[in-house]
Image: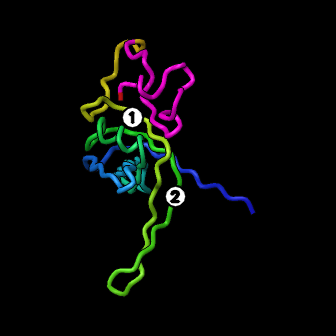
Amino acid sequence: MASYNRVILLGNLTRDIELRYLPSGMAVTDVGLAVNDRRKNQAGEWVEDATFVDITLWGRTAEVAGEYLSKGSSVMIEGRLKLDSWESDGQKRSKLKVVGERMQMLGSRGGGGRPQPANESEYSQPAVVATPESFSGENGTGETSEDIPF
């Protein structure tokens, strides 16, 4: 039987990034993401609904998040679902989380969304994308990860 585990979420961070390092030197951070949904109820009224998702980022992706993101920042996360299980006070507990494998920052460094320009060409540079592959050696343009300003 085939299986596929892929999640793409777009939302806003619910808290500031708290970056920490494992004894091995690997960076890790747990972030909260609010994903908003707007739909009409049976009475025809618009209803706002938020889903809160816990996401774990690793390595350079976690470091980039710690440097450039803060509470309220718009971000797209692509990753996979993971079920964490543990025992606390004799009771088994579990929580479904997302392991972020790719992150794309969508707003400004200050955390808010970018203003809508009169002419879209004002923003000719692409959004910053952080993936584990993009920080290991050459990135396809002849530059190395040391040439990247973050």
Q: Which mark is residue 105?
A: 1
Q: Main secondary structure of the magenta part?
A: loop
Q: Secondary structure at mark 2?
A: strand
Q: Is residue 9 visible to the viewer in this orientation of the structure?
A: yes
Q: Is residue 45 visible to the viewer in this orientation of the structure?
A: no
Q: Which mark is residue 38?
A: none
Residue type of the residue flagged with mark 2: Leu
Residue 39: x and y in percent read 43, 49
Q: Residue at x 45, y 28 (%)?
A: 145
Up/down of 131 relative to 89, above or below: above
The question of residue 134 being in magenta is answered with: yes
Nearer to us in this view, 11 or 56: 56
Residue 101: x and y in percent read 50, 46
Q: Residue at x 54, y 19 (%)?
A: 142
Q: Residue at x 42, y 45 (%)?
A: 59
Instruction: Please give the range of residues in magenta.
Output: 122-149
Q: Residue at x 30, y 52 (%)?
A: 20
Q: Which mark is residue 81?
A: 2
Q: Disc 2 and disc 1: Cα gap in Å?
A: 20 Å
